[in-house]
Image: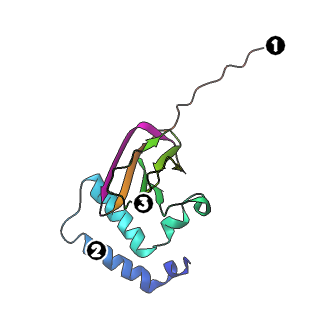
Amino acid sequence: MMGSFFNPEDIQKYIDQTKKSFEGGFPFDGESIHKQVADSINDFMPDFLQEQMPDRSQSRSNHQVFETHDYVILRMPWKSEQKPKLYMDSHHLYVPRHDNTDIQETITLPAPIKANIARAEIKDHILEVRMMKDGPEPMTEINVDDT
């Protein structure tokens, strides 16, 4: 499975591919950097992101959910010509099925997100939803009463 990761030839091949990616200059915007990292991981370990997906056995669709420092990202095939009506709360994304029934798939997210900050797009029949992570809760002190 991940044994090939420790193969020195595979590591050198990965390094060479990464160097080629930056021959035209270093991408300075966050989306280009994110895409470069995600593509590199997918090229080198194509099954890695699939293995990180929670509740894979219960999933009806072939989707990937992964995290960056600031975002939770969902990618899934989208064959319909209609734009989906997506809903989310701080821990779930609700995606309708392609057959336009009232049935929705509930995708549990790996980290809490800001339910009002998300962007979705369909490109080359892939639906990508980028949801901003909700930062850690501030620590507050709990007063202990004397009895």
Q: Of the numbered discs in the image, which one, if any, rests on residue 66?
A: none
Separation of residues labelled 2 and 1 (CA atoms): 66 Å
Q: Of the numbered discs in the image, which one, if any, rests on residue 147?
A: 1
- Name the residue carrying label 2: 19
Span of residues in magenta:
112-124
Residue type (three-letter) at the residue carrying disc 2: Lys
- Name the residue carrying label 3: 76
Neighbourhood count class around disc 1 (C-alpha, 10 Å): few under 14, some 14–19, many 20 upward: few
Residue type (three-letter) at the residue carrying disc 1: Thr
Say which of 125 and 1 sits in front.
125
Residue type (three-letter) at the residue carrying disc 3: Met
Q: Quadrant of residue 147?
A: top right
Separation of residues labelled 1 and 3 (CA atoms): 56 Å
Earlier sequence position, callout 1 versus callout 3: 3
The picture places residue 91, in percent across and down from the top left corner, at 53, 42
> For the point 61% across and 63% down, which residue is it?
57
